[in-house]
Image (tube, rainbow, N blue to C red):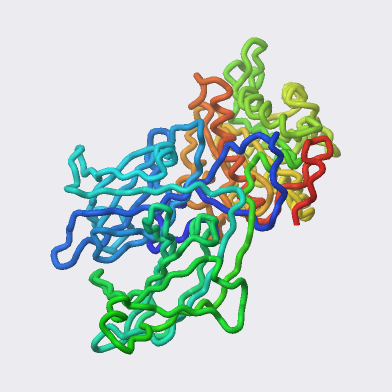
């Protein structure tokens, strides 16, 4: 399955920002180490005084989180639907990446879901929206703003509150499993439909919903599904912080019946499987006062608790631990580029002005070369007839050395490109799957080392839509399981609409058999969008996703950063277990 946050109503688009955590302990970074550029932030949402759009019941609200990207709003994630509630507290936690150097605009949209189609369609009633930035939420930690309808009109007295928490580097995850026994029966003709809520009590005595279980129908001794929450979410990483746990009898109209509650702390919860299992009396304070022989309204039992301590590693953690970025460029030499001897050709070598292939190659390559210690880069070509037999090849070294396709530095790649042009015949078709598979084989060898030692970036420069789309999709799905990212730059003025399929931003890429990518590893951009911009703008755009992709891969594999190299100040630290 591709990485995405779970939700009661699944998003129609993939989550734009996915977060994963590496398991296992690691030494603390040196004080001299640069600060991580990327931080991950949890956002919790609640609303008050929502508009009531239903005739018989109250609204069934759901919140959509959107983020602005290149002037357009893209859905990031969505909450669960809460039935018949005008003051919902959503259990869903939105997780976003926070960049200090960027203005990250967010939009929260609240809908009354009717359940006929995806939330946010014309079938649902819009209850209001609010815009802000990630920076504003992080700076204030708690933001409450009014909801607005279209044309700037207030949505009555409706407000939305967003609370942020940064996921600290020494965080951990807690997996909990609960059951209950002999709960009070609140229903007349059937048994109670219980669910459990856990609240963290903060320093200001306010309560923050940590988790809400599923509803177990018609059962006074329910067993709820195990769930995982961060230690930061559960108790702010303070084991003595008080928790309030409440058991309710679910009502489809939103008027849930209170069964009972108990208070505990994370410190009181025994680790692992224990005998006897710890349990708490589920108390109804009103019954305790009124009923002389009242004992409890049932008991809640902790079936299991597992703690996994981890570091949320950053891209810099891996780079500083010695992870090398191996850069490979693949150049399109199909006939549609035009005769290189003609000034109209995309491959024409103008001594005064580099062509688009060279501009893109240099812009991306000059950044990647800083992360490769030997400064040697693989340079490949496809779609040309090559000497000596002039057979079509979709995978040849542009230095014509089949035993070593690496060039010395970016300048070496440029020189090999210029010198190979007179020796080849541009032909076709535009097949890129062979080169993706070739780099993937090398990446697969690296994966077997089970170390975060080398990550591969493949830059494909092409003037048209690939002709082996099915094979390319299959190759990308396979590559998504490997330490590898693919950047595709469209050169020239062709219609690149179909190339957006390979970029997972508008939908999950799947193989011809329907298998989804594990990670979104492809970034596609047309060069013409950067014709009048600086080379750094192109590089920033196409490389923006790479740090996240690196961290996603090693987090999925649970590979911590390697022990820093001997020449670094951290050389005396022991290797993580």
Front residue of 360 and 197: 197
Res. 456 image quadrant: top right
Q: How many marks?
A: 0
Front residue of 144 and 236: 236
Res. 211 image quadrant: bottom left
Q: Find residue 432 and report its horizontal and vertical position in percent.
A: 64, 42
Q: Find residue 332 and report its horizontal and vertical position in percent.
A: 64, 33
Q: Find residue 152 and report its horizontal and vertical position in percent.
A: 20, 38
Is residue 516 toward the left or the right of residue 141 in the image? right
Is residue 238 toward the left or the right of residue 426 in the image? left
Is residue 509 toward the left or the right of residue 383 in the image? left
Q: Quadrant of the C terminus?
A: bottom right
Res. 139 image quadrant: top left
Q: Quadrant of the N terminus?
A: bottom right
Q: Is residue 68 visible?
A: no
Above or below: residue 207 compared with residue 380: below
Determine the residue located farthest toward the top in the rendered image: 352
Determine the residue located farthest toward the right in the rendered image: 403
- Residue at image position (72%, 34%) is 371
Above or below: residue 266 compared with residue 313: below
- Residue at image position (57%, 41%) is 466
Front residue of 443 and 202: 202
Q: Find residue 70 and report its horizontal and vertical position in percent.
A: 42, 33
Q: Is residue 4 visible?
A: yes
Front residue of 100 and 420: 100
Is residue 559 toward the left or the right of residue 19 in the image? right
């Amino acid at each position: 399955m591709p990485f995405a946050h779970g939700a009661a109503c699944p998003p129609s688009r993939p989550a734009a920002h996915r977060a994963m955590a590496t398991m296992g302990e690691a030494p603390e970074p040196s004080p001299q180490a640069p600060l991580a550029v990327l931080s991950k932030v949890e956002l919790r949402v609640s609303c008050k005084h929502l508009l009531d759009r239903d005739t018989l019941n109250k609204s069934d609200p759901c919140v959509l989180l959107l983020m602005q990207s290149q002037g357009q709003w893209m859905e990031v994630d969505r909450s669960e639907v809460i039935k018949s509630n005008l003051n919902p507290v959503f259990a869903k936690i939105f997780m976003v990446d926070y960049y200090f150097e960027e203005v990250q605009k967010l939009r929260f949209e609240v809908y009354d879901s009717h359940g006929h189609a995806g939330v946010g369609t014309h079938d649902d009633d819009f209850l209001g929206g609010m815009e802000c930035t990630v920076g504003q939420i992080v700076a204030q930690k708690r933001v409450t703003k009014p909801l607005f309808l279209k044309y700037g009109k207030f949505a009555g007295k409706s407000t939305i509150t967003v609370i942020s928490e940064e996921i600290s580097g020494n965080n951990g995850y807690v997996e909990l499993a609960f059951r209950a026994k002999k709960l009070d029966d609140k229903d007349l003709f059937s048994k109670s439909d219980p669910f459990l809520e856990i609240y963290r009590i903060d320093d200001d005595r306010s309560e923050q919903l940590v988790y809400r279980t599923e509803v177990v129908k018609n059962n006074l001794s329910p067993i709820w599904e195990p769930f995982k929450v961060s230690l930061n979410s559960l108790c702010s990483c303070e084991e003595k912080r008080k928790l309030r746990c409440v058991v309710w009898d679910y009502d489809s109209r939103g008027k849930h019946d209170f069964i009972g509650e108990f208070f505990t702390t994370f410190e009181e919860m025994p680790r692992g499987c224990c005998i006897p299992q710890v349990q708490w009396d589920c108390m109804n304070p009103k019954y305790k006062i009124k009923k002389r022989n009242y004992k409890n309204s049932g008991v809640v039992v902790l079936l299991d608790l597992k703690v996994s301590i981890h570091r949320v590693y950053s891209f810099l953690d891996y780079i500083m631990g010695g992870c090398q970025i191996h850069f490979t460029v693949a150049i399109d030499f199909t006939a549609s580029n035009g005769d290189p001897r003609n000034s109209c050709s995309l491959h024409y070598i103008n001594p005064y002005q580099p062509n688009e292939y060279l501009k893109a190659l240099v812009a991306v390559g000059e950044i990647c070369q800083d992360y490769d210690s030997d400064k040697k880069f693989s340079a490949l070509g496809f779609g040309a007839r090559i000497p000596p037999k002039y057979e079509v090849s979709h995978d040849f070294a542009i230095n014509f050395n089949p035993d070593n396709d690496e060039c010395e530095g970016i300048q070496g790649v440029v020189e090999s490109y210029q010198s190979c042009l007179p020796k080849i015949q541009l032909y076709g078709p535009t097949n890129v799957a062979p080169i993706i598979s070739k780099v993937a084989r090398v990446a697969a060898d690296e994966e077997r080392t089970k170390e975060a030692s080398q990550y591969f970036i493949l830059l494909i420069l092409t003037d048209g839509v690939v002709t082996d789309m099915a094979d390319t999709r299959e190759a990308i799905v396979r590559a998504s399981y490997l330490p590898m990212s693919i950047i595709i730059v469209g050169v020239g003025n062709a219609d690149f609409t179909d190339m957006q399929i390979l970029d997972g931003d508008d939908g999950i890429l799947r193989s011809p058999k329907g298998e989804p990518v594990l990670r979104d590893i492809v970034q596609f951009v047309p060069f013409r969008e950067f014709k009048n911009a600086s080379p750094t703008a192109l590089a920033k755009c196409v490389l923006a996703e790479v740090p996240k992709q690196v961290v996603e891969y090693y987090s999925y594999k649970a590979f911590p950063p390697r022990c820093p190299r001997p020449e670094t100040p951290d050389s005396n630290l022991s290797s993580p277990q």
